[in-house]
Amino acid sequence: MSPKNLQQVETPCLVLERGKLERNIARMRDHLAKLRVGLRPHVKTAKSYDVARLAIKGQPGGITVSTLKEAEQFFAHGITDILYAVGITPNKLDHVAALQRRGADITIILDNVESARIVAARGVALGIKFSALIEIDSDGHRSGVKPDDAMLLDIGRILEGGGTQLRGIMTHAGDSYNCDTVEKIRAMAVREREAVARCAARLRAAGLPCPIVSVGSTPTATYSEDLTGVTEVRAGVYMFFDLVMAGLNVCKVDDIAVSVLATVIGHQPDKGWIITDAGWMAMSRDRGTAAQKTDQGYGVVCDLAGAPLDDLLVVSTNQEHGIVGRRGGGTLDAARYPVGTLLRVLPNHACATAAQHDRYHVVAGDAQVTAVWPRFSGW
C-alpha cells in the first residue's frame, strides 16, 4: 500500500511538490510561447513518464534524453520523437538502429568528421539512415564545432552523403551555469542564438539542409528575449529547480519542487550538529553552490512542510549520514529537533540528487502523499 503521508514513509526518500512542478512547467511554457518557439523538454532529471507527460503537454511532443535507457523507457510509453543529446559513440549505433526499426524517430548528435564517417558507414552497413544534428560550441564550455570552423560544412556533406541524414544543428550554453549576474545570462542567451543562427546560414548557403535549430539550457531559456531563427528550445531542470538555479537568480528557493526527506537519528551538541539518515547516497556529493555567492553546503534544511529552518544546512555528509549545522557554525537548540524529527533538504543539483532515488513521493503543499511516481536510473 502507498503511504498516505510523509510520516509513514521510510527515509531517506525523494519528495516532489506537484503544485510547484506544475507552476514551473507553466512558467517556461508560457515564456517560450511568447517567443514563438516550442519546447523539447530534457527528461534526464525527471526520468519519469509521470513528470514528462506534464512537461510535453501543449508542446510539439518531442523530448530530449541523455541516455539510450531513457530513450527506451519513454518510447515504451509512446513517445517517439526523441533527441539523444550526447555525442554518439560507435558501440551505441546498433541500439539506435534497433529503436529506429521499432518506430522511434530518434536523432543523434556529433561534432567531428571522424564520428560522421563512422555513423554514415554504419548506416550503409545496416541499410538504414541515421538522423543527426551537428553540435555547435556556442560558449567554449564543452563539446561542439566552433561556429566559424570549416569542419561544419565537411561534417554536413558527409552526413548528406549516404547512411545518414542531416537534420540541423544544436547547442547547449552550459557556461550559463557559471554566470554570476542575470545580465550575463541574458548575454549568454544572445550568444547562444547568434552562434546557431550563423551556423544555420552557413549550412543553407552551402546547399545543405538545416530544418532544426535547437538551443537550450534552463538559465538561457529563462532569460531569452529573442529566439529568431531557433526552431526549438531544450531545457530540463526548470521543472524542478534547485539551489544552483536559485543562486543564479533563475528561480527562488520557494520554487524548488524536489527535496529529500530525512529523519533525525542523533545529535552532537558540543559540535552544534544534528545527525540524519540522509548522507551523500541520498543527496549526492554535488557542491555546485560552493562557487556561488552563497554556499549552501550539501543542501538547505527545511521543516516537514518545506519551509527553510533557522539557517540550517547539511554541512557535511558520509555515505548514509547527513550532518546538519548552522550556517557559519554556532550552537543550535537540539531539543527542537528530537530523534525521529522529519526534515526536508533542498538539493544543490536536482539531477544528481534525484538520481539517487527510484520514486517520487508526490505531495500537494503539505505532508499528504497524493501519489508515488516511479523513476529509473542508469544507462
Image (cartoon, helix red, strand yellow):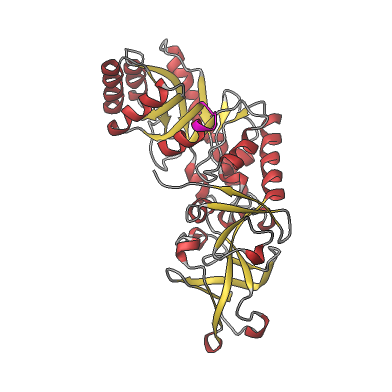
- What residue is at 53 percent from the left and 38 percent from the top? 42
Question: Is residue 78 rendered magenta in the image?
Answer: yes
Q: Please identify the residue farthest to the top as the structure is shown.
A: 207
- Marks counted in the figure total 0
Describe residue 141's horizontal placement relative to residue 234 as left or right.
left
Vertical position of residue 131 compared to residue 65: above or below: above
What predominant SS class does the magenta segment belong to? Answer: loop
* Camera-side residue of 261 and 90: 261
* Camera-side residue of 367 and 307: 367
Position in image of residue 224 (x %, y %)? 62, 36
* Camera-side residue of 164 and 32: 164
Vertical position of residue 99 compared to residue 172: above or below: above
Residue 218 shows in the view: yes
Looking at the rendering, which quadrant does residue 269 occupy? bottom right
* Camera-side residue of 149 and 262: 262
Vertical position of residue 343 compared to residue 359: above or below: below
Vertical position of residue 359 compared to residue 117: above or below: below
Position in image of residue 216 (x %, y %)? 53, 36
* Picture quarter with the C terminus: top left
Position in image of residue 330 (x %, y %)? 59, 83
* Picture quarter with the N terminus: bottom right
Position in image of residue 310 (x %, y %)? 67, 74
Describe residue 223's horizontal placement relative to residue 78 as left or right.
right
- What residue is at 39 percent from the left and 41 percent from the top? 142
Q: Please identify the residue farthest to the bottom as the structure is shown.
A: 270
Magenta residues?
A: 76-80
Residue 328 shows in the view: no
Question: Is residue 36 rendered magenta in the image?
Answer: no
